[in-house]
Amino acid sequence: MSIGGGGGGGPVGVSNSFTGTAEALELVGDFAYAYSGTFESLDSSQTMLNFQTGNFTFVGRVHCNGAVNVSNVGAGLVDSFTVTMGGSTIALLKTETGSERQWAAWVDIVIPPYTEVTVTTVADASNSGYLLTALMTGRIYRG
């Protein structure tokens, strides 16, 4: 999270601008988000998001977007996504961007304070022309 002030943002310690994709959970007031950015499709596991929550409860959604070939959207792959909390798998998601046209999968989630969260993906084939993304958005509650 960037520190504002001067000519570039809000009060010191508060970020008002999007600073780019990252594996971390970013906080903005009572809201939180994490955006993975694009990942090339691989047939081996990749970590898309990885962070530990702080002194708050997160209530929101994990949203995973399957492998899309930007030059041929009719083609596709099968992708699986694993969401873990504290090292335990809590959700398995699947997309199939070819014949099934299932471009996205999501799950609503509640994350307790001080919990390690990871979102990983693996595809049925490696192909640099196919890109995946994952994101989390929600609200945080303190106290």
Image (cartoon, rainbow, N blue to C red):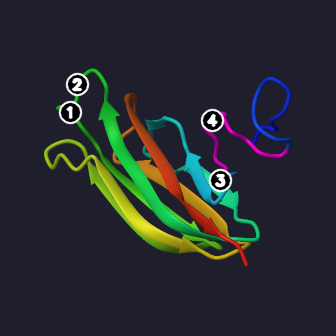
Q: Judge whether 18 appears above or below 115 on screen.
A: above
Distance from Cα at disc 4 to Cα at disc 2 = 30 Å
Residue under pointer 4: 18
Of the residues under marks 3 and 2, which one precedes in the sequence?
A: 3
Distance from Cα at disc 1 to Cα at disc 2 = 6 Å
Which amino acid, mark 3?
A: Leu
Magenta part of the chain: 13-26
Residue under pointer 1: 75
Q: Judge whether 130 appears above or below 136 on screen.
A: above
Quarter of the image holding residue 61? bottom left
Distance from Cα at disc 3 to Cα at disc 2 = 32 Å
Q: Residue 27, how many percent across, how many down?
A: 68, 53
Closer mark to the observer between disc 4 and disc 2: 4
Residue 22, label in figure: none
Mark 1 vs 2: CB contact within 8 A: yes
Distance from Cα at disc 4 to Cα at disc 1 = 32 Å
Closer mark to the observer between disc 3 and disc 2: 3
Of the residues under marks 4 and 2, which one precedes in the sequence?
A: 4
